[in-house]
Amino acid sequence: MVTLRISSLCILLLLVSSFAFASDFHLVIGEIYSHTVMSEEGARFVELYNPLEYSVDLSGWRLEILSSEEEGLNAVYFDEGSIIPTYGFFLIAISTDMGTWPGDWPFPDIITYDIPMDSLDSGVRLVAGEDDIVDTIGWGAVSDSEFYEEAPQINPAMGSSIERKSGMVHSEYQGNSWDTDNNFNDTFIREEPQPQNTDSPPEDPSASIEEHSVGILKALYGIP
Ligand SMILES: [Ca+2]
Ligand SMILES: [Ca+2]
C-alpha cells in the first residue's frame, strides 16, 4: 500500500512537473485583439509574453497572420534590436488607423499598417529564424490547420480579446505562460482587452506554476 502510494505520488509529480515545464520554456503569444469595436476599428493587436528568466532578442523573428483577404502569408518582421524583457511583454499593433488607438493603452512596440487581420476565424503564429514555430493561437473556424494548436479558441465577441492563461487556473499579474499546445484549453476570452508593452510591469510566472503543482498535490492527497 505504501509502495503504491509512493509510486503514484512519483507519477503524479512527473505529470505535474511536465505540465509546469510545458508552460515554462519558450516565448508565447499572450493576448490577441482581433474583433474590435467600431471606435477601435484600426487598433488590432497581438501581444507576446516572455516567461523566461532572460530577455530575448526578436531580430530575425516574425509574426505570421492568416488572412482571408490576401493569398499566402502575411508576416510582421521584428526590427533589429527588438528585445522582449524577462517576464515582460512586446506589443504589436496590426493597425489601419492609429487614430483609433485608445489613449489609455500603452503605445505599441511595433506598428504595422499594411497587413490585414480578420476579426473572426483566423490565427497567428510566432516564428523564429527560418521555420521554427514557437507558438500559435487560432480562433473560430480556422481554414488552415497550421494556424491553431489541437483545438482553436472560439471566436471572441466584439470588443473582447483572447488571452493565454497564467497557469492551469488563470491568475492576473502572473503572466500568460500556460501552454499545453491546446488553444481552447490554454486561453480564454477576456471581456476587456489589456494590451501590455515592453515598458509594462513584468509578471513573474513561477509563483503561479508552483501554486498549481502544490495545489494539485494537496487536493489529491487530502492535505488541507
Ligand atoms: Ca503553444
Ligand atoms: Ca495583456
Image (cartoon, helix red, strand yellow):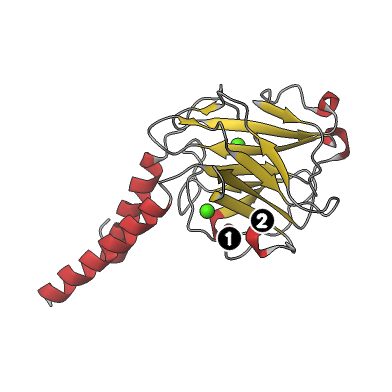
User: What's the amino acid at mark 2?
Assistant: Gly
**Depth check, front residue: 148 or 196:** 148
Q: How far apart are marks 2 and 1 (CA)?
A: 7 Å
Q: Name the residue under label 2.
A: 138
Query: Which residue is depicted at the point 70% across and 42% down?
Result: 75
Query: Which residue is depicted at the point 79% across and 39% down?
Result: 115
Is residue 172 visible to us here?
A: yes
- Determine the residue located farthest toward the right in the rendered image: 38
Side (left or right) of 97 relative to 51? right
**Depth check, front residue: 41 or 170:** 41
**Picture coordinates of residue 151 (x, y %)?**
61, 65
Marker disc for residue 149: 1
Query: Which residue is depicted at the point 42% across and 39% down?
Result: 205
**Depth check, front residue: 136 or 19:** 136
Query: Which residue is depicted at the point 21% across and 65% down?
Result: 10
**Quadrant location, the N terminus:** bottom left
Side (left or right) of 127 relative to 113? left
**Picture coordinates of residue 94 (x, y %)?**
75, 36
